[in-house]
Image (cartoon, rainbow, N blue to C red):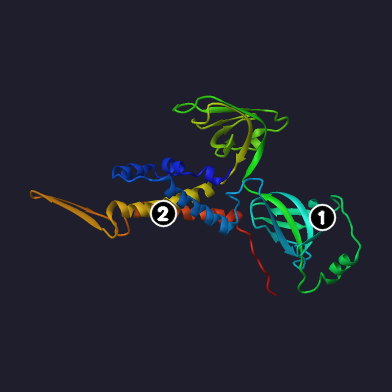
Amino acid sequence: MAVTDIVTPDYLRTRILDGVITLITQRGITLTDDGLWAKIDEAVGLLESEFGLALRQNQYSQDIDRTRITQFSDEGFQIQTSLKRPIQVVNKLSIVVGNLEWYDLPKEWVWVASANQGQVHIIPSSQGPVRLQANNRAYLYTATASSGYVPGMYSINYRAGFESDLPGTHTATGPVAPATVGSKTVTVDGLGETDLRTLLFAGDWVALGGEAYRVTSVQQAAYTLTVGARASYEGTAVAMRYDADVLQFIGYSAAMGILASYGAVLYGAGVTGTSLSLDGMSQSNSINPRGVFANLIDSYREKVKNAKDAIYAKYAPVNMAVMG
């Protein structure tokens, strides 16, 4: 699953563009899925490249980041910033020189200072088994570690993303499409001592059998979904806890591009007004020179800006240097 299983062409039509769909379709224009997907992919790609958010890769995707061994300070230990965020779990910590993986270190040495910002420290501790090597290569590695350039790095293998497996067996019952009232209830068996309210919140999304549904409420061992969920389901579930700001940024960014394109199609590029005269009666309409949807686009742009500011505050790594 990915964020594009939530923000789809239907998501844009029903949640963001619903107010202008009627106007566009009355003019004989069809909002194609291909056109909407193109705008969605542009917005998702921007967040992935600018913030390193794991949005389209599934929860099991892994990346290996490397840190030079000379990036060391008594206070920061071996600090590094992951390429993908938010970090969920560190699977492996290794010493790597070039393409040679020498040996593994206890993954418990990795302290995640900020999962959202992808900042981790490598702090040696008493946790985990340690295998020591004493040979010529290890001696050379130690002897050159303090030099200005050494092709030696820590390699951290981790999982990043917004999705996580939910425990237990999930059984869905209740109204199904085309029902217009009520909600679908999902009961969960096999939770043990786990309280579902600590893992899932109202407003999150859940994947059941490869389809994404919005959660409306959560109880200790059950939760409800919006009407329209599949008729029946029993099996595992995946929590898709994408921030509302992420969904807002993608949705409104995609909508702005759509409105700009179809505004020109509706009234023609460069048209600033229309007039009609018939038997002494006249009618005129003025159009914003920036486009028929200019005011709406400005409103969407403000929403995108606010969402991006919130994403910056939560996920952008903090880079700071002290000059002295």
Mark 2, Cα crowd under 10 Å, few <14 / some 14-19 / many 20+, is some
Instruction: Single out the residue that lies furthest toward the left.
Output: 279
The answer to whether any part of residue 8 appears in the image is: yes
Q: Amino acid at mark 1?
A: Asp
Label 1 sits on residue: 104
What residue is at 84 percent from the left and 50 percent from the top? 128
What's the distance in space between the residues labelled 1 and 2, CA to CA?
A: 48 Å
Left or right position of 42 against 123: left
Quick one: label 1 or label 2, which is nearer the N terminus?
1
Label 2 sits on residue: 257
Residue 72 versus residue 261 in the image, above or below: below
Residue 313 versus residue 59 in the image, above or below: below
What residue is at 35 percent from the left and 51 percent from the top? 262
The answer to whether any part of residue 309 appears in the image is: no
Left or right position of 72 against 182: right
Q: Is the C terminus in the top left, top right, bottom left or bottom right quadrant?
A: bottom right
Q: Position of residue 86 (x, y in %)?
A: 64, 51
